[in-house]
Image (cartoon, rainbow, N blue to C red):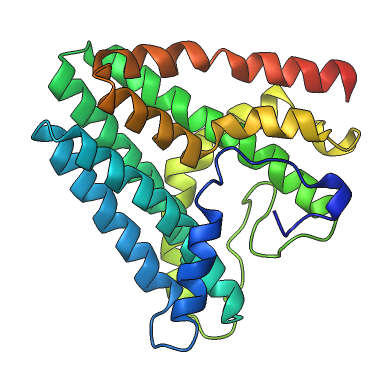
């Protein structure tokens, strides 16, 4: 949590892969590997996890889901150590995440024979959870001059940074808006005054970090290896209700 001052750092339960991600980033610092290469790596890891689920290799699936989370953190870490932030990487990361999430849920539907509509609702709930966490986290970072590649909401196409092409930013931004725009709009309507409130306490941010993608994938991995794959979809359906609980706490107290 280096993006926040010490007194406002919280335990990010979704960021368990950060220490290993930093090791990977430092190992790649003086190589020709770029953050985009690492992003491609987590895409491949996610696809392998899906293949393993289809073949009932749940321990391997869990390994590659967690590896995907680690690499998902490593691309940002590598961008920081190489001092090469980019909107291309930021949007590619997000677009890849939501597409992989969709296919992971479709795969779970296939191997559990869960109702397809409940599966789609659970996927939408998963994305809504992640959007709330990102919304609150970026607001918190912005209060302390956080990184410039993340904004509370992505309203307009950003200007390409040094080393990236504007056309790549344009295409990925459009994809991002298509895939995430509805979730951003829902969360904003539910809590449009969040940025005007008090600084979120550490305990609240730690609780909401269970909505982070890393923790979500960890839950899926654990349920797979425990033989509870049939509970994955119901869990995310029910846990989506916590979106309204956390928003209510924020509105009433902060």
Tell me: residue 122, above or below residue 175.
Answer: above
Residue 205: image quadrant is top right
Residue beneath the point at 61% across and 66% down: 158
Residue 236: image quadrant is top left
Q: Is residue 69 visible?
A: yes
From the viewer's perspective, tell me whether residue 244 is left or right of residue 60.
right
Name the spot of residue 144 as percent of width and height, x first: 85, 56
Name the spot of residue 75 as percent of width and height, x first: 47, 66
Give the number of marks. 0
Name the spot of residue 224 as percent of width and height, x first: 27, 26
Name the residue furthest left.
55
Residue beneath the point at 65% across and 29% down: 208
Residue beneath the point at 42% across and 49% down: 69
Tell me: residue 12, above or below residue 244.
Answer: below
Q: Quadrant of the C terminus?
A: top right
Name the residue furthest right.
198
Tell me: residue 24, above or below residue 19.
Answer: below
From the viewer's perspective, tell me whether residue 10 is left or right of residue 49.
right
Residue 124: image quadrant is top left
From the viewer's perspective, tell me whether residue 5 is left or right of residue 192.
right
Tell me: residue 64, above or below residue 105.
Answer: below
Q: Nearer the viewer, residue 160 or 72?
A: 72
Residue beneath the point at 23% across and 16% down: 116
Q: Is residue 173 visible?
A: no
From the viewer's perspective, tell me whether residue 218 is left or right of residue 252.
left
Name the spot of residue 16 as percent of width and height, x first: 53, 46
């Amino acid at each position: 949590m280096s993006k926040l001052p010490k007194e406002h750092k919280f335990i990010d339960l979704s960021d368990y892969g950060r220490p290993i991600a930093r090791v990977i980033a430092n190992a790649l610092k003086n190589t020709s590997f770029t953050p985009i290469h690492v992003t491609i790596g987590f895409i491949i890891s996610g696809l392998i996890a899906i293949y393993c689920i289809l073949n009932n290799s749940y321990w391997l699936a869990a390994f590659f889901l967690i590896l995907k989370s680690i690499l998902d953190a490593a691309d940002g870490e590598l961008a920081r150590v190489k001092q090469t932030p980019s909107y291309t990487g930021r949007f590619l990361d997000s677009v890849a995440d939501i597409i992989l999430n969709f296919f992971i849920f479709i795969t779970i539907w296939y191997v559990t024979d869960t109702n397809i509509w409940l599966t789609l609702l659970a996927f939408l709930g998963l994305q809504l959870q992640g959007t709330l966490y990102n919304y609150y986290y970026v607001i918190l970072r912005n209060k302390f001059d956080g990184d410039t590649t993340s904004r509370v909401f992505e309203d307009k196409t950003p200007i390409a940074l040094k080393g990236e092409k504007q056309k790549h930013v344009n295409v990925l931004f459009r994809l991002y808006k298509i895939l995430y725009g509805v979730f951003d709009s829902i969360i904003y309507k539910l809590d449009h005054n969040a940025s005007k409130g008090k600084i979120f306490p550490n305990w609240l941010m730690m609780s909401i970090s269970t909505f982070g993608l890393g923790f979500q994938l960890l839950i899926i991995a654990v349920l797979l290896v425990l033989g509870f794959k049939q509970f994955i979809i119901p869990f995310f359906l029910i846990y989506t209700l916590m979106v309204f609980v956390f928003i209510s706490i924020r509105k009433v107290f902060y």
